[in-house]
Image (spheres, grey):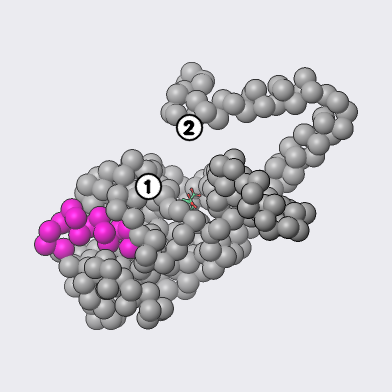
Amino acid sequence: MKVVVIGIGLIGGSFAKDIKKLYSEASIWGMDKNDSHLDEAINLGIVDQKADNESLTNADIVIVSIPVDVLVQELPNILDKVGDETVVIDAGSTKRLICQAVANHPKRRNFLACHPIAGTEFSGPSAAINRLYEGKTNIICEVEETAFKLQEKALELFQKMGMRIRYMKPDAHDKHIAYVSHLSHISSFMLGKTVIEKEKNERDIFDMAGSGFESTVRLAKSSPDMWTPIFEQNRENVVETLQEYIQNLESFKKMIEANDFEGIYNEMNNTNKIKQILNGIPLTKN
Ligand SMILES: O=C(O)C(=O)C[C@]1(C(=O)O)C=C[C@@H](O)C=C1
């Protein structure tokens, strides 16, 4: 099996690591605009050899894990070069503009739009992790636009990697992911900013930072190269989520100012249900 990974960072590298473990006969070909990343991936044994455009023609699977702005630009060019039996999978954190970019492409049926909900705040090939995707959800959009045989090929891989599959329309994906993922990143970045600005003494931050601060500010360590184009592509949904978040912050502040500690208690008590939600315990009967 020949797999080409375009963008050999945390996401692409973790795919490569799993594929190597799961398919003993797989050869992994890597492509990255950053030569040092590619060399590093080869040294780490994540990638077997460098790929060029020609490598795409007879690949079984192409995994594209690059920033979403470059993805929108490059996906049509990648599809131009692949063979009939190649399935091209992306891992972009937005879906609407990516699906739109290839909607009328003659090889649209070679493409499967995916968003594996997995990652860390780190980037680059050295951040790649074994079994990153195990037990994680992979959101697949417009599955009906992908050739059935190629869907099956990709789904077999996802199943072996232990991913759960959920199908969604690109618009719905972008709307929901704005709340659960994109807003989390903004809130973490702005928490980090507030603390850095207000606590001028770095030693105080270091000494006071327990696991509470560490866990809420973890996402503020994420790469701006990855996140700026995500916020740009999902601008409208992100603005809507921010409006609601700011309203909630304002109302929490007002309750504290008004000594409404019963209100504060209730807010937190209601929000505790996030624990059940994240444990997969249904709160409402469907
Ligand atoms: O856990 C993290 O550090 C992540 O950023 C992972 C995370 C997320 O959960 O928001 C971020 C972006 C990806 O599109 C999917 C997953």
Residue 21: within the magenta? yes
Q: Position of residue 133 (x, y in %)?
A: 34, 48
Mark identifier at residue 238: none
**Residue pictured at 26% horizontal, 59% vertical:** 17
Q: Quadrant of residue 28?
A: bottom left
- The residue segment tinted magenta is 13-26
The answer to whether any part of residue 286 appears in the image is yes
**Residue pictured at 71% horizontal, 22% vertical:** 266
Q: Quadrant of residue 54?
A: bottom left
Is residue 150 placed above or below 255 in the rendered structure? below
The prevailing secondary structure element of the residues shown in magenta is helix
Residue 116: within the magenta? no
Q: Which residue is mark 2?
A: 278
Q: Earlier in the sequence, mark 2 or mark 1?
A: 1
Q: In the image shown, does 166 or 80 lie closer to the viewer? A: 166
Query: Which residue of the protein is positioned furthest toward the left in this rendering?
Result: 25
Query: Which residue of the protein is positioned furthest toward the right in this rendering?
Result: 258
Q: The disc labelled 2 sits on which kind of residue?
A: Leu
Count of labels in the image? 2
Q: Position of residue 216 (x, y in %)?
A: 59, 45
